[in-house]
Image: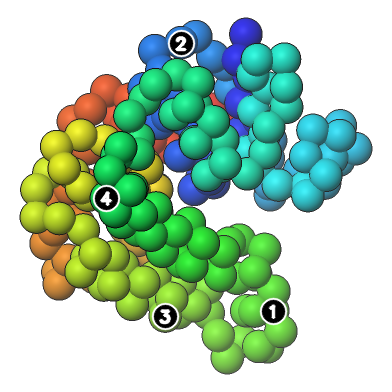
């Protein structure tokens, strides 16, 4: 059985729940509660030495780092997440990276908590999130196509990275008024069963 070591509000875990749904294969989720520091426990560190989620047990291996795992699933399950054309593939990867490598790391729970604590109250969690998520998504708005997906007419790596970030934006009450393309794409993707089933509200925690 494919096993995802998961946290319901983790953007990186959310990405993998979507992709696993797209595979159509059976899999199970085992929650790792970040608020209780279960990700720092010895058993989880044995799965992921970084002490992060997700970790995915699949094909007899334990894999870490969500984007690397997404590409592994794409390559081994033929999900079609990356275009065959090198230029289009680069655009998809750039957009996915703009979210997963730029917005997400600085808005990671550990980073944000450290910043707010060290600021001695001058920075709030909501203020931190709005400061980084808003310009990050405004840039992504300019990077994507004008259709119902980030690129082309099917799900790509960029879509899988976008949806969890839109969830975070809504959670932190980010104003998406100036992002009509992202709002349209998000609404379209929400209709796809794999995306709907992966939503944090439907995830054990």
Do we see residue 5 in this rendering? yes
Q: Mark 3 or mark 2: which comes first in sequence?
A: 2
* Mark 2 crowd level (few <14, some 14–19, many ≥20, 10 Å Cα): few
Mark 3–mark 2 Cα distance, whole angstroms, equals: 39 Å
Q: Mark 3 or mark 1: which comes first in sequence?
A: 1
Do we see residue 99 in this rendering? no
Mark 4–mark 3 Cα distance, whole angstroms, equals: 30 Å
Which residue is at the front of the view, 131 or 22? 22
Q: Mark 4 or mark 3: which comes first in sequence?
A: 4
Quarter location, residue 3: top right
Please tell me whether mark 2 or mark 4 is closer to you in this view: 4
Mark 2–mark 4 CB contact (< 8 Å): no
Q: Mark 2 or mark 1: which comes first in sequence?
A: 2
What residue sits right under mark 3 in the picture? 131
For the point 56% across and 35% down, which residue is it? 69
Secondary element type, mark 4: helix
Mark 1–mark 4 Cα distance, whole angstroms, equals: 42 Å
Mark 2–mark 1 Cα distance, whole angstroms, equals: 42 Å
Which residue is at the front of the view, 175 or 164? 164
Secondary element type, mark 3: helix
What residue sits right under mark 4 in the picture? 88
Residue 140: x and y in percent read: 28, 65
Please tell me whether mark 3 or mark 2 is closer to you in this view: 2
Q: Which label is found at residue 117?
A: 1
Mark 2–mark 4 Cα distance, whole angstroms, equals: 28 Å
Residue 175: x and y in percent read: 24, 70
Q: Which label is found at residue 25?
A: 2
* Mark 1 crowd level (few <14, some 14–19, many ≥20, 10 Å Cα): few
Rendered-image quadrant of the C terminus: top right
Residue 171: x and y in percent read: 38, 57
Q: Mark 1 or mark 4: which comes first in sequence?
A: 4
């Amino acid at each position: 059985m494919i096993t995802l070591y998961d946290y319901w509000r983790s953007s990186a875990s959310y990405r993998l729940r979507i992709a696993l749904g797209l595979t159509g294969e059976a899999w199970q989720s085992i929650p790792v509660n970040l608020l209780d520091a279960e990700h720092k426990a010895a058993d989880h560190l044995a799965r992921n030495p970084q002490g992060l989620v997700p970790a995915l047990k699949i094909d007899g291996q334990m894999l870490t780092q969500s984007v690397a795992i997404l590409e592994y699933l794409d390559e081994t399950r033929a999900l079609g997440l990356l275009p065959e054309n090198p230029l289009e593939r680069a655009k998809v990867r750039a957009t996915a990276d703009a979210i997963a490598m730029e917005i997400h790391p600085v808005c990671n729970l550990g980073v944000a908590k450290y910043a707010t604590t060290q600021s001695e109250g001058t920075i709030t969690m909501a203020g931190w999130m709005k400061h980084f998520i808003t310009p990050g998504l405004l840039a992504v708005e300019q990077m994507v196509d004008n259709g119902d997906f980030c690129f082309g007419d099917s799900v790509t790596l960029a879509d899988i990275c976008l949806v969890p970030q839109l969830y975070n934006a809504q959670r932190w009450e980010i104003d998406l008024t100036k992002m009509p393309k992202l709002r349209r794409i998000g609404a379209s993707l929400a209709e796809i069963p794999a995306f709907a089933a992966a939503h944090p509200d439907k995830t054990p925690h």
